[in-house]
Image (tube, rainbow, N blue to C red):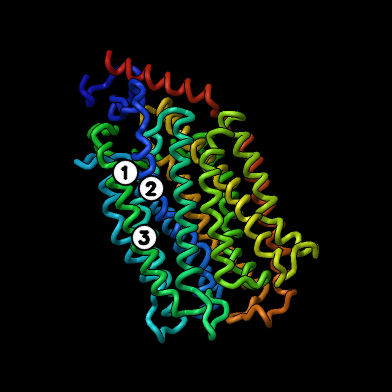
Amino acid sequence: MPDDLPVEGIVPGVETSPPASTAAQPARLPTITKFLFGVGSVADGSQIRIIGGILLLYYSQVLHLPTAKVSAALGLALFIDAFFDLFVAQVSDNLRTRLGRRHILMYASALPAGLSFMLLWMPPAGLSQDQLFLWLMVFILAFRFSHSLYMVPSGALLPELAPDYHDRTVLFGYRYMLGTIGGAIAAVLAYGVFLKKTPAFPLGQLNPAGYPPMAVTVGLLIVVTSLISSFGTHSRIGGLYRPPARKVPLMDSLREVASILNNHNFAVAVGAGMLAAVALALVQGLELYFNTFMFHMPSSNIMLIVGTQVLSAPIAFILAPAAARRWGKRYAYMGLFAASLIFTHGPIALRLLGVFPANGSLLLLPSLMFATTVAGLLQTAALIINTSMIADIVEENQAKTGRRSEGLVLFSDRLLLKVASSLATVLPGILLAWIHFPLGAKPATLSPDVMRHLALIYLPLATGLSVLAILSWLLFRIDRDAHARNLQAIAARRAAAVD
């Protein structure tokens, strides 16, 4: 039956031909295709590590823009960008082009994303504070807009490429494993190559000369890896779902968005995810401050601490699907995330109690590396399972509405990652301004009471938000059996359309 004719039980103008994933189960993706798809997350992992971990320090401690202004710029950019992500998701779900729904946007992203990332770190000398604020605002928005053109459509590919309940966890594993490795690569480049100590800057992360070459290198990494991923999945375009030709008036588009937002499981995922993202933002944004001003780590040691993620990512890739099969996605996620908190916050809590190795101790660096490795392993495994749960909402929504809206559903995942990287500079900036953290501070002369005050606010706030996020997932209702029922309902809808 033609797509544009109504069928009993089917809403006219909505999907009447099934996505490829709901027909006969396709052969599993070749490992090389999974790997090439995951390579695109190297770009995302590197930008999260650099923007989330270094941008606040660079603009406040190196360029001397007050933390309140840095926070204001990034908070406003986040608010604007959230609407842009929603727009990209809706457009991507309904595109009909020779390159399919997703790839045309993915290809368009690469060069603008790389160039705007570079310029973000290269403000002209002699700018006033207002001009520097404007430079930050313009180029953080330019980067986030262009990077969204890759991350939103590429994330939306995942449920379609891997429709099986457990197999998609494996595919998400490639995404997060390689994204974590990308963050580690960026950290090694930043702290080990470009921000190395000099006689004038014994802590290389405070050396302004290292930032422009770092920006160029990481910007090129973003361009290359996103293009590799796009080319690596190009051959799959012919087998992907092609939406029926239809005009989507503004009100209909808003109703489609509202139907996703009204989904119970989507609301749980977004609410819990936002709590977790805020907690993660605090960790990412203040990690460099604690390593620099509490533990007095030089950039070479910070490189080793962050670089341990290369070790944790492959283990998390194996652990996540195994844990999900053993305990179910929901409880596996909750347990892994809860366990990660012990190692994430343990070093700072133990330092406050006076039982962590002292600065200058031979045990300090190995202790921090161990805690970071285990925390990264557990957290990455939890994130893999978390995103796989969010992807299961795609089929639930399709079973109810007849529309396949991966972009809108996975938009929540992208939003959470973006909130984490953006708020990693906004919220820490607010806390630093609140405790009156000095501009141009030196670890050797900064009073220990300043970092103690910061830690006493940070620890209960980050831990409390994480615990609330974990408990929220008790309200999530999609398990393996529910997912199977959703696939059966989609198949029945397809049979009705054919008849």
Q: Is residue 255 visible?
A: no
Residue 145: name its quadrant: bottom left
Q: Residue at x 60, y 45 (%)?
A: 378
Spatial distance from mark 2 to mark 1, Cα to Cα?
A: 8 Å
Tag 1: Cα neighbours inside 10 Å, few (<14), some, or many (≥20)? Answer: many
Residue 88 position (above or below residue 392): below
> Is 352 displayed left or right of 141 in the figure?
right
Q: Residue at x 39, y 77 (%)?
A: 123
| Quarter of the image where the N terminus is located | top left
Tag 2: Cα neighbours inside 10 Å, few (<14), some, or many (≥20)? Answer: many
In the picture of the structure, the residue carrying the numbered disc 3 is 221
Q: Is residue 217 visible?
A: yes
Spatial distance from mark 3 to mark 2, Cα to Cα?
A: 19 Å
Verify CB contact (< 8 Å) between mark 2 and mark 1. Answer: yes
Residue 203: name its quadrant: bottom right
The furthest residue to the front: 362
Earlier in the chain: of badge 1 and badge 3, it is: 1
In the picture of the structure, the residue carrying the numbered disc 2 is 152
x then y, percent, for residue 445: 68, 82
The kind of secondary structure element at disc 1 is: helix
x then y, percent, for residue 488: 42, 19
Spatial distance from mark 1 to mark 3, Cα to Cα?
A: 25 Å
Mark linked to residue 92: 1
The kind of secondary structure element at disc 3 is: helix
